[in-house]
Amino acid sequence: MTRKGRRISVALKRAWADPEKRVRLNSWTNPDVRKRRSDGVRRAWADPEKRKRLSANQKANWANPVIRKRRSKAIQRAKSNPANRAKTSASMKAAWARPDYRERTYRKIQQSNGNPAKRAKNSAAMTAFWADPVCRRLIVKAMREAAADPERRNRKSEALKRTWAERNAILRAHRNGQVALPVGGRPRKNEERAEVKRLRGDGKSWTQIQLQMNRKYGVNKSVGAYRSLASE
C-alpha cells in the first residue's frame, strides 16, 4: 500500500469509529448517492487511460501476498454471512426476473463465447488462475465444502432434474413433430464429447477433465455436465 493509501485507510477507520460520521459514510442506501458513485465508476472504466491504471493497481495489489490474503479472508467472511448470502440471492433473483437483464446477459455471453480472441483470453486467464496454488486451494476447498453441504446438493440436484425434464420434453415434442430443434452448436458439442471420452480413455479423473475442458473453452461447467455429455 502506498503512503497516500495508508493515510486514507487511517482516516477512514477513524471516521468509521464515530457513529455520526459512519451514518454519513454509509450512504450507499441513498439512491442519488448510489447513482452518482455508479456513474463515476462507469466513467472511470470507460476511459482507456484510467481503466489501464485501475487494472494495473488491481493486479499489483493481487500480486501482494499480504493484500491478497487479507482480501481473500474478507471475501470468505462476507460469503459465509447468511445475511449477505440472502441479500445477494434476493438481488440476483430480482435482476434475473427482469426480461431486459436476462436478454442483455445472454447476449453478452453469446458475444463473448463467439469471439475467438475473447475465448483465448479467458482460457489464458483460467490457466494462470489455476497455476496459482493459493487460488487453486481456495477453489478446491470451496468445492469440497459445497459437495459436503446436503442442502446445496439437494438444490443442485433439483435444478439438474428440472433442466433434464425440460430438455427431454423438447426432445419428445421434436420426435412428435411439434417443434424443431434449434440449429447450431452441435459440431462444438460433438467435439467436446469426443474430447471428454478421449480424456476418460486416457485415465483422467472427472475433476481433471472438468478443469482441462473449462480452461480450454473458457467455460465454467460442472463435473456432472461432462459426465452427462459423455453419456449421450
Image (spheres, grey):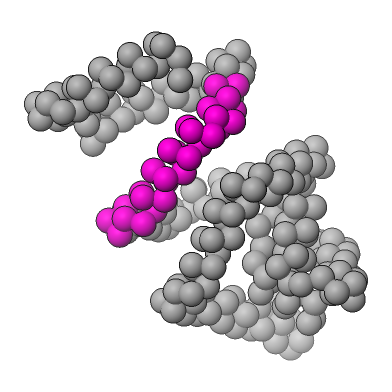
Residue 57 image-quadrant placement = top right
Q: Residue furthest left?
A: 20
Q: Nearer the viewer, residue 25 or 10?
A: 10
Q: Nearer the viewer, residue 10 or 38?
A: 10
Which residue does the image show at 49% across and 48% down from the upper left? 100
Which residue does the image show at 16% across and 28% down from the upper left? 17
Query: In the figure, is residue 56 to the left or right of 186?
Result: left
Percent across and percent down for residue 50 are: 55, 15
Percent across and percent down for residue 156 are: 51, 74
Q: Is 214 within the magenta?
A: no
Query: In the figure, is residue 27 to the left or right of 89?
Result: left
Which residue does the image show at 48% across and 53% down from the upper left? 99
State which region is magenta: 56-84
Q: Is residue 198 above or below residue 172?
A: above
Query: In the figure, is residue 11 to the left or right of 150?
Result: left
The C terminus: image quadrant:
bottom right
Residue 22 image-quadrant placement = top left
Which residue does the image show at 58% across and 25% down from the upper left? 60
The N terminus: image quadrant:
top left
Q: Is residue 53 above or below residue 109?
A: above
Q: Residue furthest front?
A: 66
How many discs mark residues in the rendered view?
0
**Is residue 79 among the parts visible in the rendering?**
yes
Magenta span dominant secondary structure? helix
Percent across and percent down for residue 90 are: 34, 57
Q: Is residue 158 above or below residue 88?
A: below
Percent across and percent down for residue 142 are: 51, 60
Q: Nearer the viewer, residue 60 or 172?
A: 60
**Is residue 122 among the parts visible in the rendering?**
no
